[in-house]
Amino acid sequence: MIILEAKDVSCPSRLSAGWMVVLIAVAVVLFDQIVKIWVKTSFYLGEDLPITSWWHLKFIENNGMAFGLELWNKLFLTLGRIAAVALFIWFVVRVKCVEGIRRGFLVAMALIIAGAAGNIFDCVFYGVVFNDPMPPELAQAFAPGGGYAGWFEGRVVDMLYFPLFDFRWPEWVPFVGGQHFEFFQYIFNVADSAICIGVALLIFFYSRDFSLAFASLEKKKG
């Protein structure tokens, strides 16, 4: 009985930490997909709904990475996302019970995993599930004409737009003089937000935990 208790206290939070990561990731992915499907089927492509002067819902789609960047082949990008999520999950499973790792670090990792997974759903399924009508028609799921792309080739749905302020650069400013500047011009989604928040938490609050986790993996290798 004493031996069993000693084993339990060696990592008392293993199960709870694992479930915490799972629950956070599932909650973020579900919320992300609910918002995306609502926007996809309620807004026509390019539609802009001002909520306030600094917050709009604007429906766009992109083929690439966060904030509309397009750097690589679509299939390669989707498979890369899947591989990254698998790697992050493996990493969390291996380090979640390392002594000194705080729960906030696991929360950050859960947000990153959920964000990457949320955009994977768009890439893998949306091209097959939804059609691609011309605006102002709305997209439909499982329409008679079929989807707009094959498996792994769907576009990521973005809708969060925060034009906080804008101005025109004075003519005398080098390189950008006379140009219009808007902050924040990028349009993103819930999944992108989860990734950014998770990365920010790691950088500003849990870099020590990250180093500790990697040191633990290196020690296990040795």
Image (cartoon, rainbow, N blue to C red):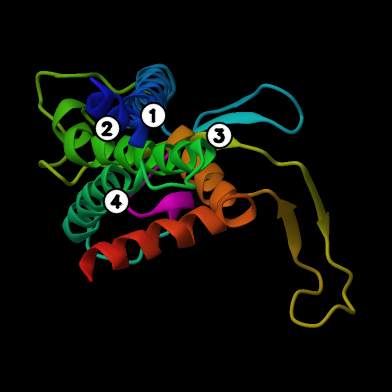
Q: Is residue 126 above or below residue 98?
A: above
- Secondary structure beneath dot 1 equals loop
Query: What span is colored magenta in the figure?
Result: 60-68
Q: As shown in the figure, which amino acid type bears the numbered disc 4?
A: Phe
Q: Which residue is mark 3?
A: 160
Q: Which residue is mark 1?
A: 13
- Secondary structure beneath dot 3 equals strand
Kindly check if marks 1 and 4 are in contact, taking CB atoms under 8 A apart as contact: no
Q: Is residue 46 left or right of residue 201?
A: left
Q: CA distance from mark 2 to mark 3?
A: 47 Å
Residue 161 position within the rendered picture, expressed as x and y whole percent measured from the top left: 60, 37
Tell me the quarter of the image containing the N terminus: top left
Q: Is disc 1 surrounded by few (<14), some (14 to 19) or many (20+) residues within 10 Å?
A: some
Residue at left 35%, top 60%? Answer: 216
User: Mark 3 or mark 1, which has the lower sequence index?
Assistant: 1
- Secondary structure beneath dot 4 equals helix
Residue at left 17%, top 26%? Answer: 129
Q: Which mark is residue 71?
A: none
Q: CA distance from mark 1 to mark 4?
A: 17 Å
User: Mark 4 or mark 3, which has the lower sequence index?
Assistant: 4
Q: Is residue 173 left or right of residue 56?
A: right
User: Mark 4 or mark 2, which has the lower sequence index?
Assistant: 2
Q: Which residue is mark 2?
A: 7
User: Mark 1 or mark 4, which has the lower sequence index?
Assistant: 1
Q: As shown in the figure, which amino acid type bears the numbered disc 2?
A: Lys
Q: Is disc 4 surrounded by few (<14), some (14 to 19) or many (20+) residues within 10 Å?
A: some
Q: Is residue 75 above or below residue 117?
A: below
